Amino acid sequence: MKTKFFCMLSLLAACCWTAHGAVIDLNGVDLTVTEPNADGYVNTSQTAATLTLDLAGPVAYAGTISGNLSLIKAGAGTLTLSNACPYTGTTHVNGGVLEAPTDAYFGSGDGGAAVTLSNDARVR
């Protein structure tokens, strides 16, 4: 299954996001999700987009994030990435914890070296 978005979206906890084996093409549209349950593939076409994962609790993300995409981890929860995510945008951790085996899991924006932290956020 492939889903392509054409307008701004915000999927709230009352509308949990589940995507198993699906391809989510943001098509340049920013997306905010509060309770992801996914092992699919999130990417964006030619136009840049931002994926914001606003988490209250722990989430293990087994999917792949790629393309001209930036990742924002928000909320007090922990996001654990279990697959390398070859997105080319930046990584911002605005709260909680972003966890992965190596920094290569965080994309290649800013030369792949920079993860921006704020609000007592942590990376481990």
Image (cartoon, rainbow, N blue to C red):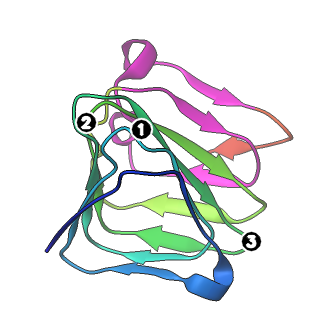
User: For the point 66% across and 81% down, which residue is it?
Assistant: 13
- Expressed as whole percent of the image width and height from the top left, the position of residue 12 reads 65, 74
- Expressed as whole percent of the image width and height from the top left, the position of residue 15 reads 58, 84
Vertical placement of residue 86 versus 43, above or below: above
Q: Amino acid at mark 1?
A: Phe
User: For the point 37% across and 38% down, which residue is it?
Assistant: 28
> Dot 3 surroundings within 10 Å: few (below 14), some, or many (20 or more)?
some
| Viewer-proximal residue among 100 and 64 | 64
Q: Which mark is residue 106?
A: 1
Q: Amino acid at mark 2?
A: Gly
Q: Which residue is mark 3?
A: 56
Magenta-drawn segment: 89-117
Q: CA distance from mark 1 to mark 3?
A: 20 Å
- Expressed as whole percent of the image width and height from the top left, the position of residue 73 reads 62, 49
Q: Secondary structure beneath disc 1?
A: helix
Report the mark closest to the observer, 2 or 1: 2
Q: For residue 53, what is the image quadrant?
A: bottom right
Report the mark closest to the observer, 3 or 2: 2
